[in-house]
Each structure stands twice: as structure tokens, then as C-alpha cells.
Image (spheres, grey):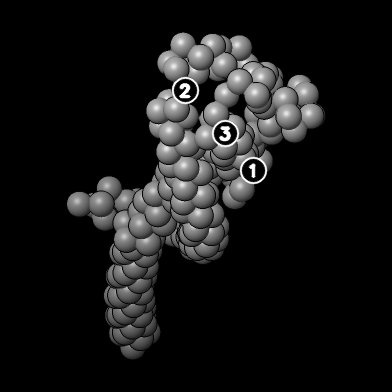
Amino acid sequence: MAQRQINPTRMELTRLKRKLLTAVRGHKLLKDKRDELMRQFLEMVKKNMELRESVEARVQAALGNFALARATMQSAALDTALLVPGQEILLEADVRNVMSVNIPVFTCKFRNLDPGSIYSYGLGLTSGDLDEAVLSLSEALSDMIALAEAEQGCKLMAMEIEKTRRRVNALEYVLIPEMRESIKYISMKLDENERSTQIRLMKVKNMVLEQAHHYMERQNADFE
């Protein structure tokens, strides 16, 4: 069906050959991009898994310490101790380009650089388990932010890989074969037309020669 809509001319043949050359080059570049995206994606997934294990371990430890603190402290005292935050955090968001994918980059800045500022209560009035829980969550904070960055990066990278894979498949299995078939069809048509033209020229030549031969015979007959 596609071949019937093609104009079998040399100009169209030249245009398709140039288009095919561009498509083949684009296919190679997209395959290289897909492979590099896959490599970086696997590295990011590995980092994501390591961060998730670290965060889950620290959060689990913090929850255990909170449970112990709640068991040893009165609920009102525990709520009062955690009522006002002792530290303020500023989160800055930026992006970095990885193979045309904008991966988010988060930067965490603390208002107070004193390590003891994470405790918003007096240490003498609370349980040591609460101190351990707050410390565990504070240490897990940087990993939580890195985990959010890695997970979003993995999601965006996976979407770009899928998009690139579809383009590679479209070129490899649809566009390039169709262009090659069209080039083959036009070449066959042009060869066929050329053979037909040669046959017509040969027939015309034979007719001209035959007419010339008869003319010469008549001329000779007139002289006789």
C-alpha cells in the first residue's frame, strides 16, 4: 500500500536515500543514548536501594526508641518536649542534566550548626531513649533527602529510557524498513522504465533503418 503512493522518480529516490542515511545515523545515536541511560539507571537504582536500606534501618531504630520513651515518660511530658522544633532546615532544589534528563538535586542547609540544636528540650527532663530517637532521625535526614532525589531521578530516567526505546524500535522495525522497501521499489521502477525506453528506442531505430532501406531501394529502382 505504501509503495503505490510513491512517486517513482530519481528526485524521490535521492530524497529517500538521504532520509535513510539520516535515519540510520539517528538510530545509532539513539541506541547509544539508550545504552548509556540504562547504565546510569542501574547505578542510580543501586544507590537508591542502599539509601532505602539505610533510611529504613535508622527510622526503625528511631521508632523503637520512641516506643521506649513513650513507655517510660508521661504522654504530656513527651508531647511538650517535642512541641517546639529546635532546628530549622532550608531545602534548596536544583536540577542536573543527565543525557537530556533533568534530575532533581536537593541541598539541605541548617539554620543552626550546633549539633545539640536538634534537641528542643532539656536533656535532664527526658528519657535517654527519646534522645536516641531524635538523634537517629537527625542522622537519617540527609539520607532521606538523598533517597527522594534518587527515587525521582530513577522515575524520570525510566520514563526517558522507555521513550528512547520506543523511538529506537520505531526506526529499526518500521521507518528504516519502509524506506528501504520504497528505495527498492523506486529503483525497480526506474530500471523497468529504462529498459522500456531502450526497447522503444531500439524499435524506433529498426523502423528508421527499415524505412531508410526501403527508401534506398526505391531510389535505386528509379535510377534503373
Closest to the observer: 179 or 202? 179
The quarter of the rendered structure image containing the C terminus is bottom left
Query: Which residue shows up at 51% across the image and 44% down it?
Result: 58
- Write down the residue under mark 3: 128
71, above or below 190, in the image: above
- Write down the residue under mark 1: 97
Outermost residue on the bottom side: it is: 224
Is 79 on the left or on the right of 139, as rendered?
left
Residue 34: x and y in percent read 49, 58
Amino acid found under the numbered disc labelled 1: Asn
Asked if residue 160 can be seen in this view, the reply is no
Disc 1 is placed on an element classified as strand
Is 108 on the left or on the right of 100, as rendered?
right
Amino acid found under the numbered disc labelled 2: Met
- Write down the residue under mark 2: 73
Residue 219: x and y in percent read 36, 80
Q: Earlier in the sequence, mark 2 or mark 3?
A: 2
Query: Which residue shows up at 79% across the image and 29% down it?
Result: 114
Closest to the observer: 179 or 94? 94
Disc 3 is placed on an element classified as helix
40, above or below 135, in the image: below
Query: Which residue shows up at 47% across the image and 47% down it?
Result: 57
Q: CA distance from mark 1 to mark 2?
A: 49 Å
Residue 223: x and y in percent read 37, 84
121, above or below 106, in the image: above
Disc 2 is placed on an element classified as loop
Closest to the observer: 70 or 217? 70
